[in-house]
Image (tube, helix red, strand yellow):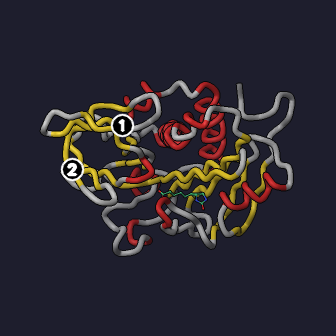
Amino acid sequence: MSQLPQGESRAIRRLHTVDSTNREALRWAREGASSGAVVIARAQTAGRGRRGRTWISTPGEGLWFSMLLRLRMLPEQYPLLPLAAALAAADACHAVTRTEIGIKWPNDLILRGRKIAGILVELEDDCAAIGIGINVRQQADAFPLDLQGHAGSLESLTGRPVSMEALETRLTAALDARLETLDFLDEYAARSLTIGARVQVALPDAAFAGVAEGIDGTGALLVREETGALRRVLAGDVSVRGLMGYV
Ligand code: BTN
């Protein structure tokens, strides 16, 4: 079942500038917006990233997108939402560039070793804002120095123009499809750059290394330690890095 109520067309709010499309989607929810409503802004003045970081959202250079969901699923399934969004964004980026896009668990999109998109899901009452930021047009030197070498954009990495409209259309459709059944973990695993890799897991108070063996039904990463123990790693409280660098 699509996130759109049956028979309703999708509400889309297109803004020139907003603080954050996620915040706007949740404000709109309080005013009565339906599930499946989409907010797209040309620029964000306070784009939000994971773990309290800022998401740089320069005007017209990327797709700054949020979809509002009125949640009709079990709370145990909420951690699947960022993974579904990552897979949908990878589907959409692949469709418009015909280039392989990998996912670094839980939800960073990677093209040629660079992060080209990120996902932030924010919950409020019975609603979720599924926030997706895709870097489309930035040149390599447009990113702050500490991100250069790590961040990239679809156009700078493929050398080809990307239609923002086509990306938006593909993303909306892919998100509808991935959220419909939440039955996507095999396809997620096929795009995962983390599964099968040696990883370093940083917990708030400790760190350990191991091999990422898979993802369980709740979206948690399963990491085999050198001792043979299998540890379940939740997305909210860790940073996972491959031992060979960013990915
Ligand atoms: C990350 O840190 O990787 C997540 C970045 C998520 C950015 C997107 S852009 C659209 C939406 N609105 C926000 O304020 N954040 C998300």
Say which element carries label 2. Answer: strand
Residue 181 position in % (x across, y down): 60, 25
Q: How dense is the environment of label 2, judged by Cα within 10 Å: few (below 14), some, or many (20 and up)?
A: some
**Relative to 25, 161 lies left or right:** left
Residue 96 seen: no
Q: Is residue 209 left or right of residue 8?
A: left
Which residue is located at x 29 percent, y 55 percent? 202
Residue 49 in sight from this viewpoint:
yes
Q: Quadrant of residue 232?
A: top left
Q: Quadrant of the N terminus?
A: top right
- Mark 1 vs mark 2, CA separation in Å: 20 Å
Disc 1 secondary structure class: loop
Depth order, front residue of 12/194: 194
Q: Position of residue 64 (x, y in %)?
A: 61, 57
Residue at 21% in and 50% down: 208
Determine the image quadrant of residue 215: top left
Q: Residues within 10 Å of mark 1 (few under 14, many from 20)?
A: many
List x then y, in percent, for residue 20: 65, 64
Lower sequence index among marks 1 and 2: 1
Q: Nearer the viewer, residue 239 or 47?
A: 239
> Mark 1 — residue?
192
Q: Is mark 2 within 8 Å of ligand 1?
A: no
**Residue 246, position as x, y percentages in the image:** 28, 55
Instruction: Name the residue rendered at 64%, 46% in the picture.
Output: 168
In the picture shown, does residue 81 fall above or below 236? above
Q: Is mark 1 within 8 Å of ligand 1?
A: no
Q: Is residue 202 left or right of residue 210?
A: right
Give the amino acid at mark 1: Ser
Q: Residue at x 45, y 28 (%)?
A: 217
Q: Nearer the viewer, mark 1 or mark 2?
A: 2
Residue bearing the label numbered 2: 208
